[in-house]
Image: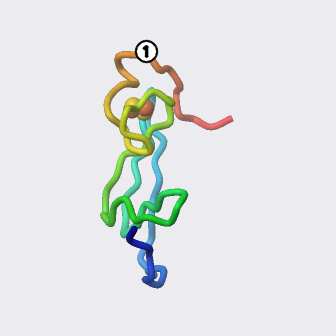
Amino acid sequence: MSESTSQPSNESVTITVGADGPLEVSGPVEIIAADGTVLRETSKAYLCRCGHSANKPFCAGAHKREGFVDAGLGG
Ligand code: FES
């Protein structure tokens, strides 16, 4: 298991809700599993919000096959 030991960056992180698709995360981020394992250190990631990905928490494209619909406008 690899646990995160780095300090938070001062660079901004943006999360964009995609229409009918994943959350796009832009910026220096670590994506950490429930057990503390660092799954990915990256500056861009797509996170599943449809619940159908076979590679959670990452988007695997299943939202298209499953017909996930959400305008991504909040509310
Ligand atoms: S949002 Fe793409 S697989 Fe769920």
Observer-nearest residue: 46 or 14?
46
Q: Assign the N terminus to one quadrant of the image.
A: bottom left
Query: Residue 50: where, in percent of width, then height?
Result: 49, 29
> On the picture, is 71 further left or further right than 45?
right
Q: What residue type is labelled 1?
A: Gly
Q: In this view, does 16 lie above or below 42?
A: above
Residue most extreme to the right: 75
Q: In this view, does 64 lie above or below 25?
A: above
Q: Is residue 68 above or below residue 41?
A: above
Q: How crowded is mark 1: few (under 14 residues within 10 Å), some or many (20 or more)?
A: few
Q: Name the colour scheme.
A: rainbow
Query: Residue 21: where, in percent of width, then height?
Result: 42, 31
Total number of numbered discs in the rendering: 1
User: Residue 65 occupies which quadrant of the picture?
Assistant: top left
Q: Mark 1 sits on what residue?
A: 67
> On the picture, is 71 further left or further right than 41?
right
For disc 1, does the CB lie below 8 Å from ligand 1?
no
* Residue found 43% across the figure and 60% down from its top: 31
Q: Assign the C terminus to one quadrant of the image.
A: top right
* Residue found 52% across the figure and 61% down from its top: 35
Query: Residue 74: where, in percent of width, then height?
Result: 62, 37
Q: In this view, does 27 lie above or below 44?
A: below
Observer-nearest residue: 48 or 26?
48
* Residue found 32% across the figure and 34% down from its top: 60
User: Residue 44 occupies which quadrant of the picture?
Assistant: bottom left
User: Residue 63 occupies which quadrant of the picture?
Assistant: top left
Q: Report helix, strand or loop for mark 1.
A: loop
Q: In which quarter of the image is ligand 1?
A: top left
* Residue found 40% across the figure and 47% down from its top: 24
Query: Residue 43: where, in percent of width, then height?
Result: 31, 63
